[in-house]
Image (cartoon, helix red, strand yellow):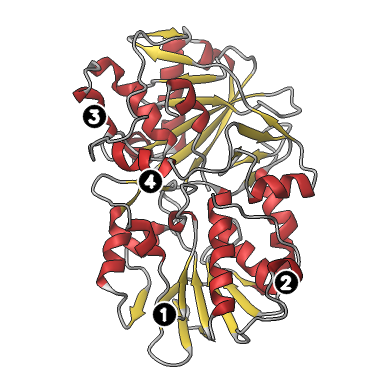
Amino acid sequence: MFDSRRKFLKAAGLGSLALFFLSSCKKLGLSSKKKFKGNVIIIGGGAAGIYAGYLLKELGIEFTILEASDKMGGRMGKLTGFSDYPIDLGAQWMHGNQSIVGEMVELFQADVSLDDTEYMYWFENELIPTLPKSVDIFDKDGLPDLSFADFAMQKGLSPSYLPIIESLAGDYGADASDLSARWVYEEEQNWSSGEGDYKFKETFYDLIFSNFGAQVANNVTVNSIVNTIDYSSDKVLVSTNSGQQFSADKVLITVPITILQSNDISFVPPLPVNKTTAFSKIGMGAGMKVFMKFSSHFFADNIYGGAVCAAYFNDAIGKNTADHVLIAFVMGQQAEALSAMNSDQSIINALLAELDTMYNGQASANFLGAFVQDYFKAPFIRGAYSYSKVGMNKNTRAIAAESVNSCLFFGGEAMNLNGHHQTVHGAIETAYREVMKIMKEV
C-alpha cells in the first residue's frame, strides 16, 4: 500500500481500536469455542489477504488465496539493485507505533527510526522554510463537505497556496479538488495509532511478507483473475478468467476499491444497491512514486508545492546508505498527467526540469538514474489508496464493509472503519476483524 505522511499535516497544522499482535489460536480466544469449520477463499494477496490467511492457518482453517498478479504484495513492493539499500516501492512509513504493526515491529525487533526531517515549500517561485500564512484550516469541527481546494479558497487563501494544498491532499492520496474537508476531519478523529512517522532500516515489505507471506505462500495461487463470485447456493463458487473454479463456504474479498467500483468481478446475485453505492462514494485516485538517484545531496529532505509533483521526500532517511535518493510522491491529477506520458523517460525529464528550476540545474547535473512505480497503470490496483471523497457520509465505509448473506466478507484498507484507511496497519486490522466474523458464523 502507498503512504500518507501525516507528519506533514501536523507540521502544517492539521492535527480505538486496540488490536494486538496475535500469534496463536489461544490468543485469538477462539480455539475452544469456534463455530466455523468450513473453508475460505481470500481474493487478493496484499497485506490484508496475507494476514487473514495467516490467522486462518493459525486456527487450522482450510483456505486459498487467489492473487490476480504474478506475485504477492498488492500495494507493497520491494526494489533491490537500484541503490545500496532495498527500497519500498509502496508503503514505507509506519504511521504511529501504537498499532498492530507497531507490535509486529517490537516482536520481530525490526529497526525503525522516527522521520522528523524539516520541510521546504516551493512558493511563488522560491524555496522557503515557512509559509507566509498558515494553512491549518482543516483541523476544526463543523467543516463543510467541500473539496480542500474550494475550502482553501473560501477561507481566503490566494491561488498561490493551491500547490501547497495539493501537497496536503496528496498526502491523502487525492487531488485537492476531490478530497472532502469535512470527511477527512471526521474520519481522522478515530485515529488511534499514535503520532509520528517511522522509517524502516530495511523494508516495510519484509516485515509483512517475510514474516507472514512466507507462512502462507503454499496457499497462494497467483495469476488468478477472479471474474465471478456466485453466492446463490450453499457453497460460494469463484470463477477466474482462465476458467478455473473454486468452491468455498466463505469468501473474503480484499481487492482495492477501484476493482469493486469497476465491476471487474460479477456477483451472482448482484450485491445490494446500497453497498455498490457505498463503493462509489469512496475515492481512490492515481498514484505514482519515482525514485531518483543523485551524486550529491543538494535537495531538502521534504519539498512541497511543485506543479509537476507536489511532494518530494528524501528516501535515504533512516537507511544505512551512501546513496542520495529522492522520491517524487505524485498523486491525483498530477499522477494522471505523468502517467499519460509516453515513456518513463518523459516522466523523469518532467520531474528533473521542475527540480532544476528549484535548484538552479543541480538535478540534471547530479542525476544518476531513476525508477518509476506507477500504481495507476497496475491492472489489478489502478491507484494509490482510498480517500474521503466529497459526497460520502459517515456510514459509507461501514456499508461498504458489511458482510453479505453471511458468506461474503470485505477487507482491505478502504474497509477500515477506525480512521486507519490508507495504511498497512489499517488493512491488517480489517483482516483480523473479518476473520473474527467468519469464525463466529455458523
Residue marked by disc 4: 387
Rendering coords of residue 5 (x, y %):
51, 33
User: Foreground mark, 1 or 2?
Assistant: 2
The residue beneath circle 1 is 229
**First along the sequence among labels 3 and 4:** 3
Would you place residue 274 above or below residue 327 in this image?
Answer: below
- Viewer-nearest of labels 3 and 4? 3
First along the sequence among labels 4 and 1: 1
| Mark 4 secondary-structure assignment | strand
Give the x, y percent position of residue 319: 72, 29
Amino acid type, label 1: Ile
In front of the other: 76 or 296: 76
Q: Name the residue nearer the viewer: 102 or 324.
A: 102
Residue 151 badge: 3
How far apart are the two marked residues, 2 and 3, measured between alpha carbons?
Answer: 48 Å
In the image, 340: left or right of 222?
A: left
Label 1 crowd bin: few (<14), some (14–19), many (20+), radius 10 Å:
many
- Find disc 2 in the rendering and name its residue: 58
Q: Quadrant of residue 241?
A: bottom left
Identify the secondary structure beneath mark 3: helix
Mark 2–mark 4 distance (CA, rounded to whole Å): 32 Å
